[in-house]
Each structure stands twice: as structure tokens, then as C-alpha cells.
Amino acid sequence: MSTLVVTTFLSLDGVMQAPGGPDEDGSDGFAQGGWLVPFADEAMMRLVVGWIGNADGFLLGRKTYEIFSEHWPRVTDPGDPVARALNGLPKYVASKTLKNVGWEHASLIKGDIVEGIRRLKQKPGRELQVHGSGNLAQTLIKNDLVDIYRLWYFPVILGQGKRLFETGAAPATLKLVDAHTTSTGAAIHTYQRGGTVKYGTIETTTWRETFKDQPGGREAVPHS
């Protein structure tokens, strides 16, 4: 069984739209494409190369497929590990509008896309990776199909744009299993499924007992 991994570049306010360039996705009037580029550094590329080496296949939405298929087949250097993986491994495209795909080792998911992805996950393998593909990622989240999130948070606030977690995502908890930072201030967090959300009420008395012996604790804890 394959592990479905969503890898996404995000601003601090959760925007994932067009991180790599102004021509990636200007829908809904988004004019801030390329916001990630000033934060790219060697550490970022090292992590990308390491993680893409875990892939046995890629799951892509239509827009990301079109961007990737325009660029990566032109990168023919056999020493480029990212190009080697993207060009050489299976690519499964989730689209209701594309009639065919021409990139080598690429195929369209036939019929119901959600059921098709469930079938792909049942195949033996390591990681089935999703890169970008915002609409597809939201479909995966709503249908509880994501096993691992690799979320790259960059120190920028955009104020508008498509977000990874939109209204309608199923409530769930996640478990942080890995974390990295880069020289430009990016924070990369890897999360696994954590289970259902639990709820409670914080009592003032609980806070008071917890912090009463800390420096300044008695003054900081509210009193009834």
C-alpha cells in the first residue's frame, strides 16, 4: 500500500497559489505569483531532492500537470535527481477536462477520481506524492485520503489567494513527526494522521495550579 503525501508551499496566512512564478496561476486576479522565489536556498533544494527520492509515483491536478509537463521534459541532465524522478516515474493526472496526456509515463485517472485515487493507494509502493495541485489537494483532504503533509511555511503574508485548508475540511488532528528550517526563514513541518479532534474547557483553577510556581506565575494567572 502506498503512502499519499501532500507537499505544499504556503505563506504564513496559508496561501498556496502560484509560489514559483507569475504565470503559474493568475486566477481570481491573483497578481503575486512567484512569492516563494526570494526564499529559495540550498537547504530547500537539498530537502526537495531527498524527499522526491522517496516517490514511486506522482499524483497531479490539471494545472500542475500542465506546468510540470511544459518544463521538466526539457530537463534532460541525467544527474538532475528531480528531473529524473519526474520524467521517469508514473504520473497520475486527476482531471475532468483533459482528454489525453502526452508526458511519458503519465496517465489520466479514469472514472470517479476519488475512487481511482483509493485504488492507486492500494498498490504496493512507497510514496505517492502530490505537489502543488491545490484543487486536487482540497479534494484529498475532504475525502480523508492524505496520510502525510509536508508543509513548507515561508515568512511572507499575502492577504489573498487560494489556501490549502478551505472551509469544509474534515476536523482532524495531526502529529508532527519532522521539522526543518532554512537560512531564509522557511519552516518545513511534516505531519502524520493524528486522529479525531478532542474538545474540552480550560478551567482557571487548572491554569493557576500549573503556573503558580513559575517566575511571575502568580501575577500572570488570572484570579476570579
Image (cartoon, rainbow, N blue to C red):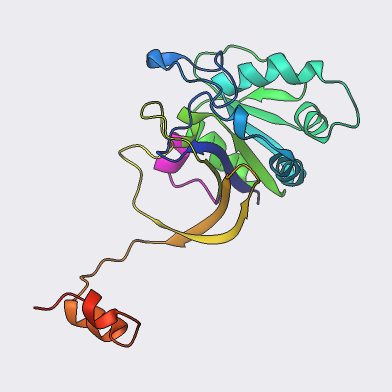
Q: Which of 222 and 19 is in front in this view?
A: 222
Residue 49 at least partly seen: yes
Quadrant of the image containing the C terminus: bottom left
Q: Is residue 194 magenta?
A: no
Residue 176 in the image, given as x and y percentages of width and height? 53, 60
Q: Is 202 drawn above or below residue 176 in the view shown?
A: below
Q: Residue at x 60, y 24 (%)?
A: 20
Q: Residue at x 30, y 79 (%)?
A: 216
- Is residue 190 found left or right of 169 in the rendered image? right
Q: Within the image, what quadrant is residue 55 found in?
A: top right
- Is residue 196 found left or right of 202 in the rendered image? right
Q: Is 114 drawn above or below residue 146 in the view shown?
A: above
Q: Nearer the viewer, residue 58 or 164?
A: 164
Count of all numbered marks drawn on residues in the image: 0
- Is residue 210 found left or right of 70 in the rendered image? left
Q: Which residue is drawn at 76% across and 25% down?
A: 105
Residue 172 in the image, given as x and y percentages of width and height? 38, 55
Residue 142 in the image, given as x and y percentages of width and height? 39, 41
Give the extent of the magenta segment: 138-148
Residue 103 in the image, given as x and y percentages of width and height? 73, 17
Q: Does the magenta stretch include residue 143?
A: yes
Residue 109 at least partly seen: no
